[in-house]
Image (tube, grey):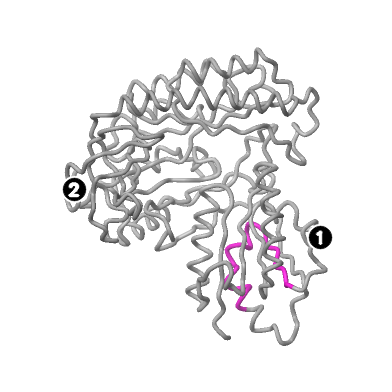
Amino acid sequence: MKRKNFFVKTLGCKVNQVESAYIIESLLREGFSLSSEKEAEILILNSCIVTAKAEAETRKIIRRWLKLNPQIIVLTGCYSQKFHNEAARNLSDNKTKLLILGQKEKFKIAEILKKFFQEEKNNEFSKVFIQVEDVSQEKACFPVIIHNFFGHSRAFVKVQDGCNSFCSYCIVPYVRGAPRSVPAEKVLEQIKSFIENGYQEVVLTGIHLGKWGQDFKPQKKFTDLLWKIEEYLGLQEKEFNLRLSSLEVNEVDEDFLEFVKKSRFLVPHFHIPLQSGSNCILKLMNRSYTREQYMEALLKLYEIYPHATFGADVIVGFPGESEDDFKDTYEVIKNSSLNWLHIFPFSSRSGTPAEKFYNKVEPHIIEKRAKILKTLIFEKRRDFLKKEIGKTRKVVLENFDEIRGMWKGLSENYISIFVNLRDKKTELKGKIVKVKFLKLEKDYLIGDLVKDFQNKKA
């Protein structure tokens, strides 16, 4: 087979990013070559449909790619899992061959493409080739083991897939299946691989991270995995960061709080989705907590780590959200330790209960409410950053900014920072250093290097 060039684009969550890294590595292993979008003969899109915007972006990218006239386009991920037949109908008249692969099949892309090019002359593959299996009954989580997390200074580790919470607005359970966990030994194998390749921060990620271990017999808790990772990292001779992508409020229990208090490696950054501060709306969303429970959990974490970044997802304009409901959300954000937000205008998803809910909120009202929350969190974030001036924190160096002549990094407590470090050596990327924060500029801090952690025990 003649060596073929490929390009991968990823939309959506950290899990998709990990899976795309696996796709890249598996294709390179099979003799394919990674190239730019314009030069690629094979264009691969790992798609997302968590919002209408992400869904529209998928269609937009495919339309643009068709104009580039590649040999083949591969559409995989959540969009193809849900809309494979629609995609096939809309694109069947184009000259470019289209492979539409589901969530399970994305891990076989290298194998499928290799077979495609071997059999191309025999025309075994039709113009539109669809391979999408139902994931609703899937029992195992494919253990994604990669050696390099392409383009990243911090390594994401997929430990879990799927969700069975069925929030009324969310399409994810329908396209990702039930919760499935990666065995602890495989998680440690992946972390070991990253450590051997120089990474010093690992970010645990999953579709519903806190569900890890619940599908095992006997069941295990997420904290069981955390303690195993803690023990493993403790055997190493370097400084490490352990970061969590997201946890639900009900998973901030006594076992987790005990881990937070005792861990040497867990960083002070907690993303706890809120979605709404109104108990009425939370019930309509099928979220299994109240505003009071949410604020209590955040307070417990804040008492351990007052300097942490506390982030949340918030949906604005959910059907039936009144001014009082929105005020409740505003008050929770204002009066809690939250200092970072992802704000999502409500997006109706096909096949979810919320799609049929009445009392839709007018778009101009949603836009107004979103702006109010953006202003609030902007002010809270600046106040948080100002309080950090003069503090010294661990920072992972991410990339050297040629314009500033400084390294850009991310602090342990999730602050973007420029470090007064002029050494451009590429081997510094991904390393942990100690930085004193000096001043605030826009939404980031400027700091001085204090001490290099390399080859030192904590």
Vertically, is 277 above or below 215? Answer: above
Asked which secondary structure carries label 1, the reply is helix
Residue at 19%, 47% in the rendered image: 453
Which image quadrant is residue 120 in?
A: bottom right
Closer to the camera in the image, 436 or 255: 436
Closer to the camera in the image, 123 or 311: 311
Residue at 41%, 19% in the rendered image: 299
Amino acid, disc 2:
Asp
Residue 90 numbered tag: 1
Query: On the picture, is 111 further left or further right than 184?
Result: right
Query: On the picture, is 171 further left or further right than 376?
Result: right
Q: Estimate the x, y position of residue 17 in percent, counting from the top left.
A: 51, 54
How many labels sit on residues?
2
Q: Estimate the x, y position of residue 422 in percent, counting from the top left.
A: 23, 53
Closer to the camera in the image, 290 or 274: 274
Q: Estimate the x, y position of residue 416 in percent, counting from the top left.
A: 37, 40
Neighbour class for label 2 at 10 Å: few (<14), some, many (≥20)? few
Residue 6 numbered tag: none
Residue under numbered circle 2: 452
Closer to the camera in the image, 290 or 396: 396
